[in-house]
């Protein structure tokens, strides 16, 4: 899983930077300030959790375990659901896609909880 999480972290980081630049330069003139802010929220959370995936991958090298694997999987799922739904909502204009976003937020929270529990068990 270490390799998978490193690849996912690299992909999420790369695409997060690319989407942020796309929003700042390509979408700025086409979107309302509100929609641009929603898109940038997706980028922000994607980049934060790209770093979290990178950290989980590094931790797995030294402390392999199910909780860390779960944390990385939940971070990746959170990026897909949270950030992905925000991107889709803004670019498609389909407001109902916002229903998916909280599930991504829950995945992020569960990932952080798994990471915390893994740390607690190491003490």
Image: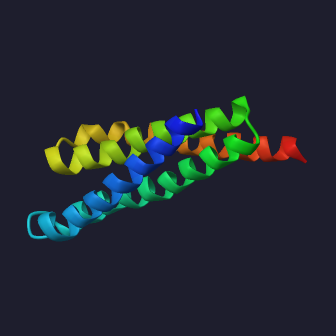
**Is residue 55 shown above or below 113?**
below
**Left of 52 or right of it: where is 76?**
left
Question: Quadrant where the N terminus lies?
Answer: top right
**What is the x, y in percent for residue 73?**
54, 34
Give coordinates of residue 11: x percent, y percent.
38, 47
Pinpoint residue 103: horizontal percent, then vertical percent.
Answer: 46, 37
Relative image position of residue 49 (x, y in whole percent) = 50, 52
User: Is residue 58 shown left or right of residue 28?
Assistant: right
In the image, farthest residue toward the right: 123
**Residue drawn where x is 21% and y is 63% of the image:** 23
* Colour basis: rainbow
Q: Which residue is at 29% across, 65% downward?
A: 37
116 lies left or right of 2: right
Between residue 73 and residue 91, name the one nearer to us.
Answer: 73
Q: Residue at x 26, y 57 (%)?
A: 19
Residue at horizontal 43 percent and vertical 50 percent from the top: 10
Q: Is residue 74 visible?
A: no
């Amino acid at each position: 899983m270490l390799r998978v999480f490193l690849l996912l972290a690299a992909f999420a980081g790369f695409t997060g930077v690319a989407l942020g630049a796309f929003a700042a330069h390509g979408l700025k003139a086409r979107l309302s300030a509100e929609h641009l802010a929603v898109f940038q929220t997706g980028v922000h959370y994607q980049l934060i959790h790209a770093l979290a995936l990178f950290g989980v991958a590094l931790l797995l090298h030294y402390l392999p375990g199910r909780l860390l694997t779960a944390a990385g999987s939940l971070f990746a799922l959170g990026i897909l659901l949270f950030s992905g739904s925000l991107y889709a909502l803004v670019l498609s204009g389909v407001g109902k896609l916002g229903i998916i976003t909280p599930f991504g937020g829950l995945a992020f929270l569960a990932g952080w909880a798994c990471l915390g529990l893994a740390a607690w068990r190491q003490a």
